[in-house]
Amino acid sequence: MRTNLIQAIAVGCWLAASPVAGADGNGGAFSLQQAIDFALENNPEIGIQQARIEQADAQLGEALAAFYPQIKASLSYQHSDNPSQAFAMIIAQRRVEFAKGDAYFSHPGGVDNYRPEVTARYALFRGGQDYYRKQAAELGIESSELEKTATRHHLINNVTAAYYGYLAAQDAHELSLRSMEAIESELNQSRIRYEAGTLLKSDVLSLEVQRAEAQDGQIQAANAIELAQAMLKTLLGMPAEQNLTLTTTAEQVLPSPPAEFPALLDQALSQHPGLKAAETRVGIAEQQLKMAQAAHLPRADAFVSYGSDSKDLAFSSNRDNVSTGVMVEVDVFSGFATQEKIKKAEHELTAAQEAARQARLHVEHQVKAAQLKLLEALNREQVTTVSVQAAEEALRLVNEQRQAGVVTVTRYIEAEVARDKAKTRDISARYDALRADAELKLATGFWN
């Protein structure tokens, strides 16, 4: 009945809505496409996903930094009266005085040493770790972009569901108002007939009960409109006090019947962004595993340093010096840290693979459920259209009989209730079909 439809609309709109930050701009009439564009512009989830893309891009830049020389400048100060260290500093400062004798070498006294230095280091070989890190970072950007696309698709679907929920609530409310008007008119006429003694008291009471039920439905329908409007405002990022109206054609065009399940599934598996993101995360885990395994290989770095030692900060090219060389190292034993990192990477790869498999199963179920919902709604709409026509004709005939005094008011009430139920089912089926079509587009990754 109408009450069930109104409750379903309210619950559907609540589930479809997601928090959106307040948006600037003036309220106005929105078509469905304008509502979608507005939500895509103002929903913070889109901004969050864009920030994650930029974060992944920065991680790629960080990984690429390993392929460039690393240059550092430093200034160190040291004071020592240790003969070996002090004399080494004197030699580095090129101010040795051999004429001072043995006492000079044994007791050089406290020596200050300042050393400004520039050092450059370049990684010649790191077992491929830098390369695998770069590959993982590139896949990270791809994964973030796919996740942003998936977020957009979910937002579009939510806006579409809320939009049609709002229109369905409006249609249900208009139906309740028309029902109220018809019942009120019939009740007024029945009271006159009762006063004239041509109608039973029970018929008048039956109409009053029917009016009370219609009033209850009208109150719920009006509340469903307010709730649907509030949810749509939230979804669009509009403040609660801002006016919102929707533009729509007199009759929503029903979607076409869906394709066969294998074709829909192939489409989903080839372009569903959520599934593609899960598969990309498997690739990231594979690169991270290779990076962990590469820690067993040796590492080779080339370095060069240029500096000057002096007893004060005065720089002189007569005291500068250059050191250069190559260093090769390998971890002989790291307390099993490398092995544990490999195990961790292996488990992360397994988890990513299972997550991708779970995502595929979810997509398969989502596609099948959306296809069945759309088929059901379209079939229901065909049936309810015929039902409405039959109920309208039945009500017309009963009304004529009622005017002729052939049937009681109870029979008229029954015919009117049947007409209202038929229209309620038709509204529900029509908007269910539109929402199911949106869900099918979400499941197959069709949204642009």
Image: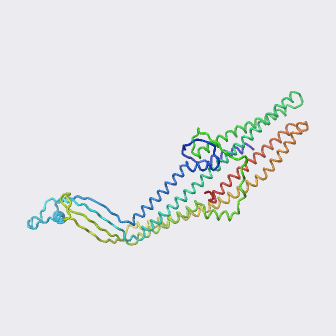
Q: Position of residue 44 (x, y in %)?
A: 53, 49
Residue sitting farthest toward the top: 195
Q: Position of residue 224 (x, y in %)?
A: 67, 41
Q: Is residue 49 left or right of residue 93?
A: right
Q: Position of residue 396 (x, y in %)?
A: 85, 42
The number of numbered badges drawn on the structure is 0
Q: Is residue 64 above or below residue 26?
A: below
Quarter of the C terminus within the rendering:
bottom right
Q: Is residue 117 above or below residue 299?
A: above
Residue lying at 13% horizontally and 62% vertically, measured from the top left: 108
Judging depth in this view, the residue of 74 and 17 nearest the camera is 74
Residue lying at 39% horizontally and 70% vertically, measured from the top left: 126
Judging depth in this view, the residue of 8 and 381 nearest the camera is 381
Q: Position of residue 370 (x, y in %)?
A: 67, 57
Query: On the image, which quarter does residue 316 sit in?
Result: bottom left
Quarter of the N terminus within the rendering:
top right
Q: Is residue 67 left or right of residue 140?
A: left
Query: On the image, which quarter does residue 329 sit in?
Result: bottom left
Q: Is residue 405 left or right of residue 129?
A: right
Judging depth in this view, the residue of 225 and 50 nearest the camera is 50
Q: How is the image coloured?
A: rainbow
Q: Is residue 372 above or below residue 400?
A: below
Q: Is residue 274 above or below residue 237?
A: below
Query: On the image, which quarter does residue 412 sit in?
Result: top right
